[in-house]
């Protein structure tokens, strides 16, 4: 069965949270590449028994942060023989805060409403009929983050930070050519690199905070503002006429 997409799954010390049976159950229709970001626990050992023509493991030599794990995962993914038959690539959080059942809904959303879209971004919007459960404090900080990002980079995106995104394969070389400035806000930087393409947001039906996240938003707030300044200098101030 041909896969609809290759999904990059960045991992760092995820042994306690990986549900490989869930990934296996979707691996007939989708292919998964786990980018193991120098984990020091049993993450690689848990993934290895599941590896086949649909599930791949790529071990980074050392911990480099989620942004670089995602970037290297895309770069390695493009070299896989299966990519000859795959038109879409994406990345997905290893903790499955966004259930894999949402993958098919991404494509149905595009098919029925935005068939010309090159990028589909998951959006954690609470609404009737959905199950979106977010930590209140992280949600508030996330809204501040999104407002600042939109004012600087004009992405018109409600939720840049959702860890579920899909891209036309042809776009990938446009955003993986060089490391991201920001480890913490790389989603914004990635989207800024391809903001001239058609991007749409799919309002997720189901998303839940999963315990064990390694990102402490309050601790990186200053770093994010610093990175926004650097990104603004590069992507906005250095435009050629």
Image (tube, rainbow, N blue to C red):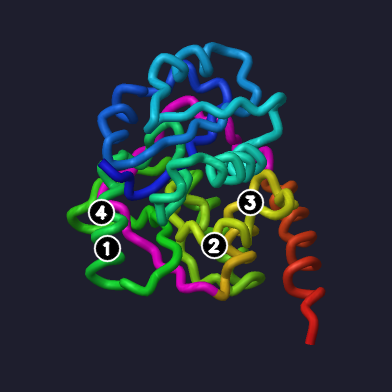
For marks 1 and 2, the one nearer the N-term is: 1
Q: Nearer the viewer, residue 168 or 20?
A: 168
**Element at label 1:** helix
Of labels 3 and 4, earlier in sequence is 4
Residue that badge 4 annotates: 105
Q: CA distance from mark 3 to mark 4?
A: 25 Å
Q: Is residue 67 visible?
A: yes
Query: Residue 109 got which mark?
Result: 1
User: Spatial distance from mark 1 to mark 2, Cα to Cα?
Assistant: 20 Å
User: Is residue 134 rendered to the left or right of residue 11?
Assistant: left
Q: Tags 2 and 4 in contact by the CB under 8 Å rule?
A: no
Gap between marks 4 and 1, in whole Å? Answer: 6 Å
Q: How many marks?
A: 4
The residue indicated by pointer 2 is 171
Q: Nearer the viewer, residue 30 or 208?
A: 30
Residue 57: percent from left, percent from top: 51, 27
Q: Which mark, residue 186? A: 3
Q: Quadrant of residue 127?
A: bottom left
User: Left or right: 237 with respect to 77?
Assistant: right
Q: CA distance from mark 3 to mark 1?
A: 25 Å
| Residue 69 % position (x, y) | 62, 37
Say which label, 3 or 2, has the lower sequence index.
Answer: 2
Q: Is residue 216 magenta?
A: yes
Q: In the image, residue 220 lies at what x, y percent?
A: 68, 42
Cα gap from disc 2 to disc 4, whole angstroms: 21 Å
Mark 3 packing: few (<14 Cα in 10 Å), some, or many (20+)?
A: many
Residue 121, disc: none
Q: Residue at x 36, y 23 (%)?
A: 20
Magenta segment range? 197-220
């Amino acid at each position: 069965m041909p896969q609809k997409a290759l999904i990059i799954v960045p991992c760092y010390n995820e042994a306690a949270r990986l549900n490989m049976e869930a990934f296996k159950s979707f691996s007939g229709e989708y292919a998964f590449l786990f980018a193991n970001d120098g984990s020091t626990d049993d993450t690689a050992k848990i993934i290895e028994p599941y590896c086949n023509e649909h599930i791949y493991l790529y071990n980074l030599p050392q911990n480099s942060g989620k942004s670089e794990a995602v970037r290297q995962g895309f770069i390695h993914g493009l070299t896989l023989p299966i990519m000859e038959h795959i038109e879409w690539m994406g990345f997905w959080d290893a903790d499955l805060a966004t259930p894999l059942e949402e993958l098919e809904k991404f494509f149905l959303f595009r098919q029925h409403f935005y068939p010309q879209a090159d990028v589909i971004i998951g959006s954690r919007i609470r609404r009737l009929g959905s199950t979106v459960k977010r930590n209140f404090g992280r949600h508030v900080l996330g809204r501040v983050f999104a407002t600042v990002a939109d004012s600087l980079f004009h992405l018109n995106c409600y939720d840049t930070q959702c860890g579920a995104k899909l891209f036309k394969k042809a776009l990938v070389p446009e955003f993986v050519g060089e490391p991201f400035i920001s480890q913490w806000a790389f989603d914004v930087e990635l989207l800024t690199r391809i903001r001239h393409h058609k991007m749409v947001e799919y309002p997720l039906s189901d998303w839940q905070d999963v315990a064990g996240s390694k990102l402490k938003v309050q601790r990186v707030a200053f770093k994010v503002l610093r990175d926004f300044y650097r990104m603004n200098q590069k992507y906005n101030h250095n435009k050629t006429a």
